[in-house]
Image (spheres, rainbow, N blue to C red):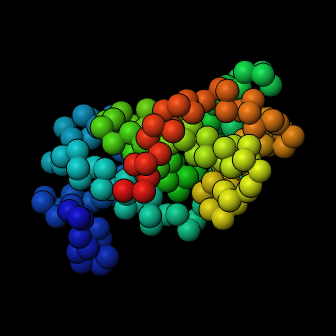
Amino acid sequence: MSLQTRGNNIVVTSRRGVVVSDIAESIINSKPLEWIKNRFPVNDEEVFEVIEYYGDKLEGTISDGCLTLLNQGTVEDIDLEVTHISDAMFFKLLQYGRIFYPSELRFEWIFQGGLEMAIIEIFKDIEAGNRDFENSDFHNYIYEAVSDTVGKDINATEVLKSLPVGLYNERKHLRSE
């Protein structure tokens, strides 16, 4: 890992001593990777290590209301839009998306992919007749946000029709590596 703690518990990149909270703030403010690399003397690996660090560090702070969605589509053709997200859930979704899209460098695509993959896992569980996702706060809060938006009685198969399940099936092995 190329992050280290200095002084009064200030976490910085090992190579150049860039304060990771500055990098994280840029990510939260929707700055693209290239902008961050031009602003700070960091490389791709260091930026993604910051995402990993914050995803792990903030995981325990994910709570009710961390994600709010709006269905821009219909009950038959769900099209979810994020209208509110906590920093903790944001970094966790980036971290999760990176598992499925390890070569992707655009945060918005990684985020979207992370959200889609988590929703797929949740509704594949439901479709299979189990609720294993409830063992994960991360997955459970996403389920709550989706069901608050589209209804708790929504058919799992209907939800999955709107998502890239084939891609999930192709890449799910990456999660176990």
* Spot occupied by residue 42 in the image (x, y as percentages of width and height): 18, 49
Q: Residue furthest bottom?
A: 8
In the image, is 80 to the left or to the right of 50?
right
Q: Indicate whether 26 appears above or below 78.
A: below
In the image, is 137 to the left or to the right of 129?
left
* Spot occupied by residue 135 in the image (x, y as percentages of width and height): 66, 65
* Spot occupied by residue 126 in the image (x, y as percentages of width and height): 74, 47
Residue beneath the point at 16% across and 64% down: 14
Q: Residue furthest front?
A: 128
* Spot occupied by residue 163 in the image (x, y as percentages of width and height): 60, 30
Residue beneath the point at 33% across and 42% down: 102
Image quadrant for the C terminus? bottom left
Question: 68 or 171, which is in the foreground?
Answer: 171
Q: Residue furthest left?
A: 15
Q: Indicate whether 119 appears above or below 4.
A: above
Question: 22 or 120, which is in the foreground?
Answer: 120
In the image, is 4 to the left or to the right of 113?
left
Residue beneath the point at 33% across and 35% down: 104
Residue 78 in view in this figure: yes
Residue beneath the point at 28% across and 49% down: 47
Q: Total of numbered circles in the picture?
A: 0
In the image, is 27 to the left or to the right of 137?
left
Q: Quadrant of residue 18?
A: bottom left
Residue 28 in view in this figure: no
Q: Indicate whether 141 appears above or below 100.
A: below
Question: 113 or 174, which is in the foreground?
Answer: 174
Image quadrant for the N terminus? bottom left
